[in-house]
Amino acid sequence: MPKPERSPALQPAPVATSAQPLPFFERPPSAPESPARPSTARIVLGFLTNPGATVQRRAAEASMPVVLAVSGSAFALFFLQAGLDRMRVGNADALSIVALVLIGILFGTIGVAAVALIAWLALKILRSDASPGAVVRVCALSYSSTLVYVTLGLVANLLLGWRTAVAFGVTGVLWSLGPLSSSLRGMARGRLGVSLVLATLCGLVVLAGWAWLGGLL
């Protein structure tokens, strides 16, 4: 007499065995690793060796307060060294230096943003699709090289007693024209002449503003 078959519900559950690794082609894809954030030293080295590419890469991921803090710090140290140079020849006192630092902060944030907006208007006339915020970020972040120069200049000013406002500050502003021109070239649809003219005009306005404001006190 044949034995009755057990229903599936009454069949014993399979005994659990040790987990075996799946073959490579059946394994679920692993989560992509988040890219490591570059160190500060690498960022600074990038600004010194390849500033144009570094500015364009960092401007896309940096917020507006961060980039304005870069240009504000750069011009605060720039105006500080101008005040220290004037104090050494007896043309400024401690209060004047504090006032110059505050002017430098305002000039490096509001002034740089205003110059960048003028450049954006020129790009808009040339039918560029760049946003005003993008132009401000690029323009402000271009002064990262200026920040490096004026930081070195402040060390030389305090430790060696050198007059560094022109030697380091003006040189730093001129050095920023390279990355600014490179960034504006992409926004001007690759027109090198337009980017050079705009970067040069921005640099002239900034240096003229520094010279005028630095001589007020």
Image (spheres, grey):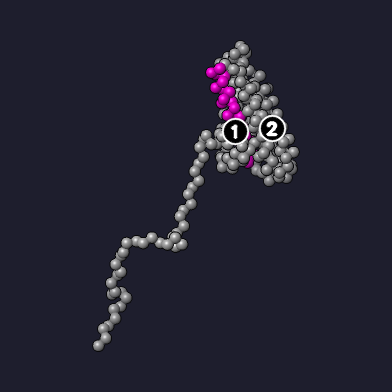
What residue is at 61 percent from the left and 37 percent from the top? 50
Q: Residue at x 66, y 34 (%)?
A: 178
Q: Which residues are magenta?
A: 133-160
- Percent of width and height locating residue 143: 61, 32
Q: Nearer the viewer, residue 108 or 58?
A: 58
- What amino acid is labelled 1 in the image? Leu
**Which residue does the numbered mark 2 point to in the structure image?**
202
Image quarter (top left, top right, bottom left or bottom right) of the C terminus: top right
On the question of residue 100 being in view, the answer is no
User: In the image, is residue 151 part of the stretch drawn in magenta?
Assistant: yes
Q: Report the amino acid beneath label 2.
A: Cys
Which residue appears at 31% of the width and 64% of the height? 17
Closer-to-camera residue (45/197): 45
Residue pointed to by mark 1: 48
Instruction: Report whether 33 appears left or right of 4.
Output: right
Q: Horizontally, is 100 left or right of 17 in the view? A: right
